Image (tube, helix red, strand yellow):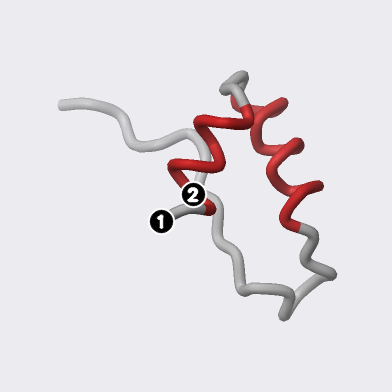
Amino acid sequence: MTSGPNTVLFDMGGVLFTYSPARRLTYISEMCGIPESEVKVGIFDT
């Protein structure tokens, strides 16, 4: 059996905090160690 995810990102589109796509992209990229281009395709372009 595999372990579950170590990170879950839940975004309510600015309901809980000011939403800044560019700032969010940079943060996710830095925290996950994934290039911004991959994060953009996997999250923001879906």
Q: Classify 10 Å Cα crowding around label 1: few (below 14), some (14-19), many (20 and above).
A: few
Q: Quadrant of residue 2?
A: top left
**Dividing the image into 4 quarters, which one contains the C terminus?**
bottom left
Q: Is residue 29 above or below residue 10?
A: above
The amino acid type of the residue labelled 1 equals Thr
Task: Please provide percent x and percent y for residue 14.
Answer: 73, 74
Task: Please provide percent x and percent y for residue 45.
Answer: 47, 53
Helix, strand or loop for disc 2: helix
Q: Quadrant of residue 35?
A: top right
Q: CA distance from mark 1 to mark 2?
A: 6 Å
Task: Please provide percent x and percent y for residue 40.
Answer: 55, 42
Q: Which mark is residue 46?
A: 1
Q: Classify 10 Å Cα crowding around label 2: few (below 14), some (14-19), many (20 and above).
A: few
Q: Residue at x 49, y 49 (%)?
A: 43
Query: Is 7 in front, or is 35?
Result: 35
Q: Residue at x 81, y 47 (%)?
A: 23
The amino acid type of the residue labelled 2 equals Ile
Q: Are the residues at dot 1 and dot 2 in contact (C-beta closer than 8 Å)? A: yes
Q: Which mark is residue 34?
A: none
Q: Which residue is mark 2?
A: 43
**Dividing the image into 4 quarters, which one contains the N terminus?**
top left
14 sits to left or right of 4: right
Helix, strand or loop for disc 1: loop
Q: Residue at x 63, y 31 (%)?
A: 36
11 sits to left or right of 31: left
Q: Residue at x 75, y 37 (%)?
A: 27
Q: Is residue 42 above or below residue 35?
A: below
> Residue pushed farthest bottom?
15
